[in-house]
Image (cartoon, rainbow, N blue to C red):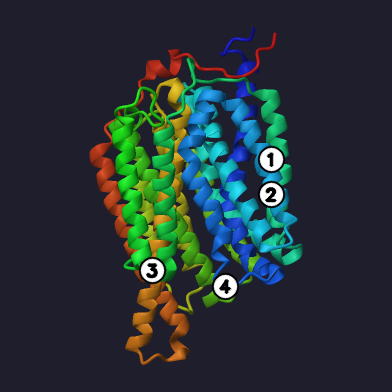
Amino acid sequence: MATTDAPAGNSRRWAALFFIGLAQLMIVLDGTVVNIALPSLQRDLGISDGDRQWIITAYTLAFGGLLLLGGRIADYTGRKRTFLVALLGFAAASALGGAASGFETLLIARALQGAFGALLGPSALSLLTVMFTRPAERAKAFGIWGGISAAGGAIGLLAGGALTEYLDWRWCLYINIPIALLAAVGGYAMLAESRHEGRVRFDVPGVLLVTGGLVAIVYGTGRAESEGWDAPLVVGLLAAGTVLLAAFAVVESRVRQPLLPPRVIADRTRGAAYLAVGLTGLGMFGAFLFMTYYMQVVKGYSPVRTGVAFLPMVTAVLVSAGGLSARLLPKVPPRALIVPGMLTGASGMLWMLTLDPGTGYARGVLVAGVLFGLGAGLILPVAMNYATHGVDPGDSGVASASVNTAQQIGSSIGLALLNTIATSATADYLASHGGNPALAKQALVEGFGTASAWAAGILAAGALIVAALMNAPRPQEQTIEDAPSADPLPAHS
C-alpha cells in the first residue's frame, strides 16, 4: 500500500486535482457561456422576451436551491460516487439542451444542469478538502482551485462568443460533454471513495425549508431586476425566503442529524470566509456584467473581441491565485490576504468611474479588469480554503456546499441589486438631460459607474468586517512538516 508521502501518492493527488478542476471549470463556465448565446438561441427557438429569462433562471434556481442537499448527499452516499454521477448527469443534460427543438425541452435541460451542478460542486470541493490537508500543499491546491473559480466566468465569455459566432449556440451546451466525460474517466481512475461514517438519515424538514428558502431568495432577486425591489411579488418572495431560512436555523439546532450542523457555520473564521466569497461573487458578476455591456454596447466590440479583452483579467487572476496566494497562505493569517484582496477588487470597481464612451481599452477596462483579477485571486483561494478548514471530515460535503451557496446567493443578489442601481442611474441621467438620445451611451456609462461605486463600497465594508471577524492565526510551521495528509486515492504498490 502506498504511503501518503510517496512521490507516486503525491503525483496522483495532483493528477486527481486536474480532473476535479475540470469539473469546477465546467460549472463556472456554464454560468456565463450560455449568457452570450442567449440572443441567438432566443431567435432560433422563437422564445419570447418574457420567457428568455427562464433559460438562466431555471439553472440558477435548481443550482442554488439544491446545493446544501447535494453536499449532504455527497457526505452520506460517497463523494466519488456523487462526483461521477453528477458529471454524467450534467453531460446528459447538456446533450439534451444542445439538441432541444423547443423552449420547454431547453428549460428542462437547464433545470437538470442546475440540479446535477448542485451535486457536482460540493462533491468536487469536498474531495479537494480531504485530499489536501497539509497547509503548504493545501494552499497550492486551493490556489489552483480559486484561479479556476475566478477565471472561469471570463473564459466562459470568450468561449461563448467564439462558439456562438463561429459555430452555433448549441455548442455552448455541447462543450460540456467532452469536459464532463474526461473528468469522469480521470476521476474514476484517480479517486477513491470517502463518506460520512454511520447510519444515513436525511433531515427532510431541513431539506424542504432550506430549498424553499434559497429558491425564494434567488428567484426574488432575479425578478427584482425586471419588476423593481418594491414590487409585491419580490417583497413577498424575499420575506418568505427569510422566514423559511430562519425556520431552517431553528430546526437545525434541534434535530439529531441536521442537514447543516450549526458547528459548521458558527466558527468565526469559516463565517468570515463565507462572507468574503459571497461578497466577491457580488462584485465579480457585477464586474463581468458592466464590462461586457460597456465593451459590446458602448464600444461596439464583437462577442469574440469582448472575450479576448477579458484575457488580461484572467491572467491577473491566475498570477494572483496560483502565485501570490499559494506562496503566502502557509506563511500569513488568512485575513492578511483576503482584506487586501477585497480592497484591490474595490479599487477595480472604482476605476469604472473613470470611463466614458471615448476611453481607450488600455486606460479603461484593462486597468479595471487587472485590479479586480488581482483582488479575486487573493480572496477566493484563501476564503475557499478556510471555508472548509478544520471542519469534521464527515461534514466536508456540506461545508463545501455552504461556500458554494454563499457564492450563488451573493452573485444572484449582486446582479439584481447592481443592475437595478445601474438602470436607475442611467434613467436619471437621461431625464436630467432632457432625454437626449445622443447621450444614450454616456447615460449607460454613468449607470455602470454608479453601480460600480456601490459595489466598491460593499467590498470595502466587507473587508472591514472580515478584518474584525476572521481571527485565524498564521499556520504553524510544524503542521506543515508533520501533519498527516489524507490520501483518498487508490492504493498501488
**Which percent across, then down, holds residue 59?**
56, 52
Q: Position of 323 compared to 16: left or right? A: left
**Closest to the observer: 299 or 168?**
168
| Residue visible at 48% across and 47% down in the picture | 64
Q: In the image, residue 176 lies at what x, y percent?
A: 68, 47
- Per the model, the C-alpha gap separating discs 1 and 3 is 36 Å
Mark closest to the chain's N terminus, 4 or 3: 4
- Residue at which label 1 appears: 180
Q: Which mark is residue 273?
A: none
Q: Determine the CA span between mark 1 and mark 4.
A: 31 Å
- Judged by depth in the image, the label closer to the viewer, 1 or 2, is 2
**Quadrant in the picture for the C terminus:** top right
Indicate the amino acid at tag 1: Ala
**Residue lying at 69% horizontally and 26% vertically, measured from the top left:** 188
Is there a contact, CB below 8 Å, between mark 3 and mark 2?
no
Q: What residue is disc 2 on?
A: 94
